[in-house]
Image: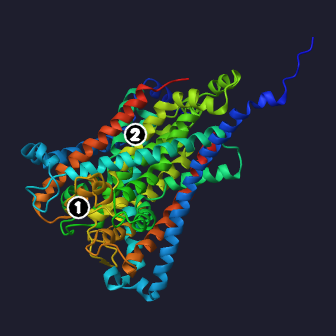
Amino acid sequence: MSAHSVTAGAVSRSLEGKRVDIAGYVFTGILLASLLFTLALLAILVGDQLQRGLPVLTERGTEFVTSPLSSRPDRAGVMQGIVGSAALAVIVSILAFPVGILTAVYLEEYAPANRLTRFIDVNIRNLAGVPSVVYGLLGLAMFVSLFQVLGVGNGRNLLSGGLTLAVLILPLVIITSAEAIRAVPSTIREAGYGIGASRWQVVRTLILPSAAPGILTGTVLALSRALGETAPLILAGAVLGSFSTGGSLADLFGGPYTALPIIVFDWARKPQDEFRALTSAAILVLLAVTILANAIAIYLRSRFDRRW
Amino acid sequence: MTVAAPSGTRLRGTPRRRRNEGLVRTLLLLASILSVLVSAGIVVSLIFEAAQFVMSIELPQLFADGWFPRRGQFSIPTVLVGSVLVTVIAMLVAAPVGLASAIYLAEYATPRVRKTVKPILEILAGIPSVVLGFFALTLINPVVVRGLFPDAKASTILAAGIGVGLLTIPLVASVSEDAMRAVPQALREASYGLGARRLTTSLRVVVPAAISGIVAALILAASRAVGETMVVALAAGATAGSLFTVDPLGPGQTLTGAMASLAAGSDQVTGDSAAFLSLFFLGFLLFVITFGLNLIGDIFVRRARQRY
């Protein structure tokens, strides 16, 4: 048989579909298995925490989320963590969102293409890659010391923790907002300038409203990240172990503080078995907050996904 | 008939309008400068206190038998090798699973599957690391690690490494999927036109074409793994310090784990003791390592963008 007819035979066989592509099926199987593993991971993780923590939540009910910290497992609750995390979220939103969005506006709409702009841009990208624990050191060296000097307690308070988290998510807010602003087509800007609007008028009345869904998505994701961060707060002086807080605002912002992830870490380290179940219950509360925030962000993005 | 040329002053707008525009521009520039100040703050606080640490100790202390800050033993090789071990294990988990998931999503999945799976991956990426740390301590180590190696300890570097790996899967998957989807359709069509099947097209055409982006994904994931703190702090177990070890089946200390246990230890981080200052030295090392990795990763990202 000549080489030609061998090739022709192979071609016609494969065209008629008689050859089974075993390697192809195996490869597809491996790929699919990897993806399913990743997805199953989320289910296993959440399922495991539910199995461990749900009994605590059903048994103690709302009392678990309204009780303060305690060294006794049957009394310990996460109220202070919820209050702390909520207060941190407020501080972070007030500090990081305006600065981040204004920076994004500057970089996308105002900045001339010069060395300073490039420097700021590269700098922000690098900041986004700095490990969160290093931000904790910044918080310890700068913010805690600052409030110590100012005489706000011993400096280890919600304000220094909030400042630390705010600078931590600032690059994230800037990068996502800048992307949203960049996605606004230039025809919209040109229309604005064409009818005589100034640069700021174009930004305020055309660009920001058009980019709002994207900016909102980015800020919610950043907030969710801040709510889950543990290491920077441990370094910036969040309290491990139980303590009591006074009722006034000054006590809240100037006194010792904790947050949900800090409580999770603290309880996870305790040797008693009872605290294992409590840790999972606290994790369920934390996951409810962060997964909800992420889901909202993802929903917002798909809801307002606009094709220009 | 000639049209009168508009006078220069009218084109520049009224003085009030110009003043307002200038004000806004200045405000926005100041917001952008803030991010540069944050970087400067990080670098200054790290270098200043790290230098103080180096001056306060004798050089042999940096090469002691282990990392025991309270005994004045600050063995840098111990924590560096610990970090390398955790990072290598994490990459052994995250690289194959993340890449395979990315190939499936980019080359095999229907748009509907992709639309369902990507948000789930994002939610997985949003799980706080302290939760994965608890998961690694209470499920991965007793079930997976001790199931495979019955004589493994109660907390192991291996479990911490796997935990960190799971944490970085979404990062590897999303960055390398983006890179593969950026490969022009024409390359795939050319490959199919030559009679190549999907397996060959994916592995021999798409992956090589997207290799810069894939390498970038792996480098960024490694940088993330080096800087990951909470998983190591909970699952690697060496809270009181660690002897030099290369055994992944026992407890160990990493750069980040050492920082967390210094900050969370009973000797609350205060004062100017060498143990306190060593925090900043570790932070400085961590900053330099991740900065270097991110820089290399960025080069690959840029190369991936320029290609097509």
Q: Position of residue A16 (x, y in %)?
A: 44, 23
> Residue B54's x, y, as percent?
48, 81
Disc 1 designates what residue? A266
Position of residue A207 in the picture relative to residue A61 (left or right): right
> Image quarter for residue B199?
top left
- Is disc 1 on the same chain as disc 2? yes
Q: Which mark is residue B137?
A: none
Number of disc labels? 2
Residue name at image x 67 percent, y 26 percent: A197
Real-space Cα separation, disc 2 to disc 1, in angstroms:
26 Å
Rendered position, B256 above or below B171: below
Q: Nearer the viewer, residue A83 or B294?
A: A83
- Give the structural element (helix, strand or loop) at label 1: helix
In the rendered image, the residue lying farthest to the top is B1
**Residue A107 to residue A249: above or below:** above
Of residue A28 and residue A4, the one placed in the foreground of this image is A28
* B153 with respect to A302 (left or right): left
Q: Output the chain of dot 1.
A: A
**Amino acid on which disc 1 is placed:** Asp
Residue A20 visible? The answer is no
Above or below, A254 relative to A31: below
Residue picked out by circle 2: A220
Q: Earlier in the sequence, mark 2 or mark 1?
A: 2
Quadrant hosting residue B1: top right
Q: Could you tell me which residue is drawn at 35 percent across and 61 percent down?
A: B229
Dot 2 surroundings within 10 Å: few (below 14), some, or many (20 or more)?
many
